[in-house]
Amino acid sequence: MAFSGSKMIIQPLSHSLHATSRSDNPLLSDPFSKAAKPITTSSPFLGSTRTLRLNQSVATAQRQAASRIVAVSDVFKEKKLKSKTNLLLTKEEGLEVYEDMILGRAFEDMCAQMYYRGKMFGFVHLYNGQEAVSSGFIKLLKKEDSVVSTYRDHVHALSKGVPARAVMSELFGKKTGCCRGQGGSMHMFSAEHNVLGGFAFIGEGIPVATGAAFSSKYRREVLKEADCDHVTLAFFGDGTCNNGQFFECLNMAALWKLPIIFVVENNLWAIGMSHLRSTSDPEIWKKGPAFGMPGVHVDGMDVLKVREVAKEAIGRARRGEGPTLVECETYRFRGHSLADPDELRDPAEKAHYAARDPITGLKRYLIENKLASEADLKAIEKKIDEVVEEAVEFADESPAPSRSQLLENVFADPRGFGIGPDGSYRCEDPKFTQGTAQV
Ligand SMILES: Cc1ncc(C[n+]2csc(CCOP(=O)(O)OP(=O)(O)O)c2C)c(N)n1
Ligand SMILES: [Mg+2]
């Protein structure tokens, strides 16, 4: 099953890796095998949008790409069923993933409301539609594993266990936020949860994630901390893959066999720029084999498929077998940010992906396979509504940061530049923000 169909694609394991492994696609072969197969058919990539968006030059580029010999590791080839029950996850796992996706969606919907009520400042980028990627990957991690995100970071932080109230409070710019109100929407960070930051400059998080992965390997191999098998996930978008840091880090990660997974959330757009118009070869996953690591393309609207691929990639990293590049084809249901009226994307394209809502797909799977009843899922939805409501109340009632916090994390010594001749903090002067402080 490729991505060109409009049907939801959640199936038992025997079929589940078709899209993840492209086993219906001759692109899949072992990069280390001498018998890498040439591509004989055109790629199913972006099948859903190609008729809507494909222009002549892209069509030509895709034909040229299809004539090259491409190889991908067979790590992700279709596997036989391991579980006797024929199911992709247990009831507990299914409910955990469902709850996480519902939390992501409900949290973001609440953010939209709060933003329009003036409770948040600056740009706010929501994650609606992409939940299968965050939940599919992050729920498989251990606490010690790290996550690095972008400006679209709230849901990654939530999946990694940062409490909703700490994320909401951060968005409100309050002292109780996970960065004490100094980061805001685009800079979620929690040392405790190994969320190493949301980064507003695209691509900036990739070297940070590569460094985190390097430190895990260094601890294990040089400092002989045998139990340090920590893995890092770097999340970033399709537009970011045209940025130099992406290539530099793929090279380093492959060279040093770092325990990292590069997770591309290809939502087909970089603000108002279509992915197909902005990149010479739109199949991002192919860049993995070019650097000597597996590259995988997975249906990012299907959490079960994402999870299967994530298991393999995380397992490889933990066993010291090196990095993986995973391209998740997904879609954002809202504009680029809450300031974007979202008028550029074709309504037919939006409708196509809306019909493939990842939460609806998981719900159907859980019910059809008797892993959960409607009532179980309703109970989760109700619980999450309460969690999100409580997060808003908590954020609203929390105090604003003190003035003395203004220069913290700006200078090594928080008093540094901001200390007056009498030793007082300049930022404590009530006129400081008016620019007329006398110290
Ligand atoms: C280094 C840098 N250049 C340009 C920008 C402006 N910018 C903000 S978002 C964005 C598009 C990124 O798209 P993508 O990586 O696909 O992420 P998405 O928003 O789709 O999640 C750009 C170019 C930036 N933030 N950083
Ligand atoms: Mg994008």
Image (cartoon, grey):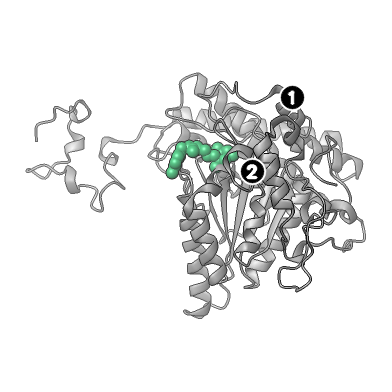
- Image coordinates of residue 27 in percent, x first then y, are 77, 57
**Residue 196 is at least partly visible in this image:** no
Residue occupied by mark 1: 348
Is residue 234 in view? yes
| Disc 2 within 8 angstroms of ligand 2 (CB) | yes
- Residue at the spot x=63%, y=68% of the render? 318
Instruction: Locate residue 220 relative to residue 159 in the image: left or right.
Output: left
Residue 81, placed above or below residue 170: below
Q: CA distance from mark 1 to mark 2?
A: 18 Å
From the top left corner, tell me how far across and down residue 386 is, in percent.
64, 31
Question: Around disc 2, counting alpha carbons within 10 Å, would you say few (fewer than 14), some (14 to 19), or many (20 or more)?
Answer: many
Residue at horizontal 66%, vertical 62%? 314
Q: Ligand 2 near label 1 (Cβ, under 8 Å)?
A: no
Q: For residue 67, which quarter of the picture?
A: bottom right
First in residue order: circle 1 vs circle 2: 2
Label drawn at residue 266: 2
Please report the residue visible at 40 percent of the width from the left and 41 percent of the height from the top: 180
* Residue lying at the far top of the rendered structure: 117
Location of residue 378 in the rendering, given as x and y in whole percent from the top left corner: 78, 32
Question: Label 1 crowding class (10 Å Cα cut-off): few <14, some 14-19, many 20+?
Answer: few
* Amino acid type of the residue that numbered disc 2 sits on in the rendered structure: Asn
| Circles 1 and 2 in contact, beta carbons < 8 Å | no
Q: Is residue 184 above or below residue 18?
A: above
The three-letter code of the residue at mark 1 reads Ala
